[in-house]
Image (tube, rainbow, N blue to C red):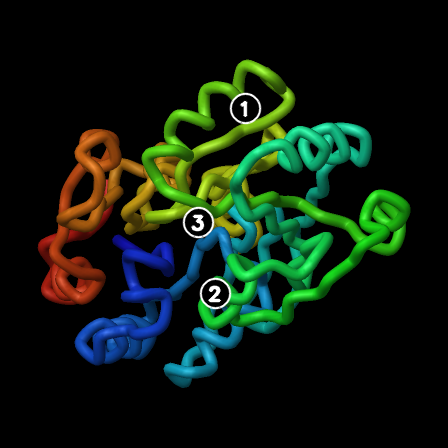
Amino acid sequence: MIKLIISDLDGTLLHDHATIHDTDIQALRRAQEHGVAVAFASGRMYPEIQEVANSIGMQVHAVSQNGAYAHLADGTRIKADYFPRELQLEIIRHGRNTPYQMLLCAPEYYVIEQDTEHARKLEPRLKASLKIVPDLEDKLGTEILSSKMSFFGDVEALREYLPLVKEKFGDAIDAYIADIDCLDIMPSGISKGIGAHALLAELGLTVGEVVCIGDSFNDLPLFEITPNSYAVEGSHPDVQAQAAYTTPSVAAVVEQILNGSLTGK
C-alpha cells in the first residue's frame, strides 16, 4: 500500500518555475484526504518549498537542496549537511573563471559575490531572498553555511562543463544538470535519495510504501530508493530510462494510487 508520495517541484509540479496545474493540486489534496502523505523533494531550499506548499494550502514533508536537508510537515528538521569549507572555496575559485552565474545556497537564502544582470534575471524564479556578499570567502563556513552551489547558463555549455568539474573535484562532489539552464554541485554523499531515506526512517515507512516522481538528473537517486518510480513524460530520455514508469502528470500517478491500480511493491 502506498503511504507516501514524493514529488519533485521544478519541471514536475512547478511549470515555468511558477505554476502548479489545478489538477495536480486537487489530486494531492485528495491523496492526503485518503491518508497518503505528501513530500516535495527539490533542489530548492526549505523556505521555498514551504512557500510552494502554502500557496496551494497544504502541509508537506520536505527534502530540500537535493537532500541536504529533510523536514517533517510540522517543520521539524531531521537532517542537515553542509559543504566542507575548503572544498567549497576551491569550487568557488574555479567557478570564477567560468562564464556562468554562480549561486551559493545557504539554508534560507541565496548568495552571490557581486550584483550581475544574469543574477537579476534569475531572481524572479527564486522564492527566497538573494544576498550580495562581497567578502564571501571570509564568511564561508562561519556566518554562511552552504550545502549546494548552482551554475546557470546555456544548458549545452553546462553539459560540457559537467565532466570538467567531475574531473577536477573527483569523488569529493556530486554534480548533475538539475534544470534547463542549471548545473548543481553538491558535496559527495548528499542526494535526494539519501534525504528521502531519512524521511522514510523517521516516518517508519518501507521503500515499497513510497512513490517518487521527477523529471531531471537530480531525481535519479530518488528513483533508486523505490520500485515505484515515475519520470514525467517529456523529460530527458536518460532520466526516463532510470525510472520504472513514465507519467503525464503527478495527478495521473495519484489517480492510480487512489483507484487501487498502484499498491506498491
Q: Residues within 10 Å of mark 1 (few under 14, many from 20)?
A: some
Q: Do the residues labelled 1 and 2 touch (CB within 8 Å)?
A: no
Task: Residue under label 1, please give it.
Answer: 165
Mark 1, secondary structure of its residue: helix
Residue 31, given in percent of the width and then of the height, sits at 27, 71
Q: Where is residue 191 in the image (x, y as percent from the top left)?
A: 51, 38
Q: Along the horizontal axis of the image, is 247 left or right of 43? A: left
Say above or below: 180 vs 39: above
Q: Examine the image and state in which quarter residue 56 appears.
A: bottom left
Residue at point 35% right, 40% down? 155
**Kind of residue at badge 3:** Leu
- Quadrant of the image occupied by residue 185: top right
Residue at screen point 48% across, 47% down: 152
Which residue is denoted by mark 3 in the rendering? Answer: 205
Indicate the position of residue 22 as horizontal and vertical percent values.
21, 80
Along the polypeptide, which appears first: circle 2 or circle 3?
A: 2
